[in-house]
Amino acid sequence: MYAELIIKNIGSLITLGHGEKARAGKEMGELDIIKDGYIAIKDGKFVGVGSGEVDKKYIGESTIIKDAMGLTVTPGLIDPHTHLVHGGSRENEFSKKLEGVPYMDILNAGGGILSTVNSTRQASFEELYKKAKKSLDIMLSFGVTTVEAKSGYGLDIETELKQLEVVKKLNEDHPIDLVSTYLGAHALPPKYKGRRDEFINEIIGALPMIKEKELAEFCDVFCEEGVFSIEETRKILNAAKKLGFKVKIHADEIVTLGGAELSAELGAFSADHLMAASEKGMEDMAKAGVIADILPATSFNLNKEYAHARQMIEKGVAVALSTDYNPGSSPTENLQLAMQLGSLKLKMTPKEVITAVTINSAYSVDRGKEIGSITKGKKADFVIFDTPNLEYIMYHFGINHTKDVYKNGIQVVADGKVIY
């Protein structure tokens, strides 16, 4: 089986092993790094992985051989928690936040999430598509090849569907693979104050249509004090599960509410944020195999406490990392920044960090059998970093280390520039 493409002379080849499951606990840091490695690709998939001289069985007359010049190669990065599609931005609130104006005061003045909801409702499909595509190009330039994208800035069915339609179209048009999530339960619209059950029934009522149109694979709820309670979250997500949706939960971001425990009860693929997760919640997640998706850029931007990643790892939880890209609490598409914060603020080792943004993120969006490791038979999504080793990516922070990106074996970033 001749390869179509071979990358040789890889200084540090981080394969993540066979990638048969998420790596939990101490397994996150137990990586074998191949020195002087090579990879062989055919029909958009990996067909060979090795070290030293390339096995001649992969080399045919038409095989293209490229020299990685001793640089670092990892699987394509995966960002498993974003609010990709939204209208407007909220830099007008930035100075107020720095002055210490409470979020509720900003919200009551028409700002906060209500500002984004208004902008998203007013934006056309084309405007939302163009804005989100620009963000995807930035993500791609940082080495991201798969992205989860949530709705949630409509708070009405029409706009939620518009957001999900944009995600579907971008998934068809853009090199990055998109995983779509319905987050109708992102906040309670002001007009439903005192009529919570009515809004929750609307959220649930939209699920069959979303399923029929194949607009979302996952359903998510912002489970938090003052937003949606444990009981309300359970009701929404159980309804979603009955229709075949996979579930995620925005859990224990601010208050120790029990969202982590609920994620285990429901068999969620991930519980996200978790800055206030209890020890029992972590233990329940570990037993149930729920992935902890931590969003350090949000803590950084809000000057809030970071999630206790070390404690989670010690308790046997599989940890993933995301940008939480959104216009309010984390306006950044830079997953490498989240990785660097993972080391600097969450005290994760470089090996744990790369595990968190590859194989663990892949399983958190139910793509672990297809992506997340450099393994024979998986999609040939990989990044060549302009670094001598893995540690350098986290050590030299604040810049983009990406040199080249390949998606399904096709180069989409060359020398740091998007070229698809």
Image (spheres, grey):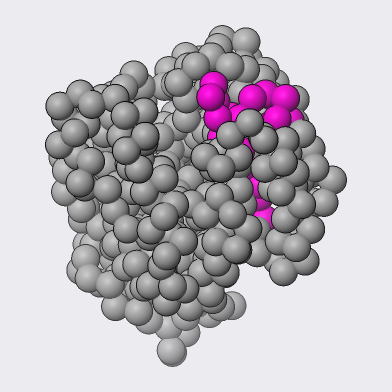
Q: In which quarter of the image is the C terminus?
A: bottom left
Left/right placement of residue 360 relative to residue 246 reads left
Q: Residue 304 falls in which quadrant of the image?
A: top left
Residue at x 43%, y 59% (from the top left corner): 120
Name the spot of residue 235 as percent of width and height, x first.
Answer: 76, 34
- Along the horizontal axis of the image, is 375 left or right of 204? left
Residue 344 percent location from the top left of the image: 25, 26
- Whether residue 143 is visible: yes
From the viewer's side, name the closer residue of 218 and 212: 212
**Residue pictured at 29% horizontal, 25% vertical:** 102
| Residue 273 percent coordinates (x, y) | 47, 30
Residue 347 appears in the picture as rendered: no
Q: Is 310 inside the magenta-drawn segment?
A: no
Residue at 29%, 62% in the rendered image: 138
Q: Which of 38 and 290 is in front in this view?
A: 290
Q: Going by the picture, which residue comes out furthest to the right?
A: 242
Q: Is residue 396 left or right of residue 221?
A: left
Q: Is residue 223 magenta?
A: yes
Closer-to-camera residue (204/68):
204
- For the record, the magenta segment spans 217-234
**Quadrant position of the N terminus in the picture:** bottom right
Above or below, 109 against 274 in this view is below
Percent position (x, y) of residue 336?
29, 46
- In front here: 42 or 190? 190
Q: Which residue is drawn at 39% across and 51% down?
A: 116
36 in relation to 191, above or below: below
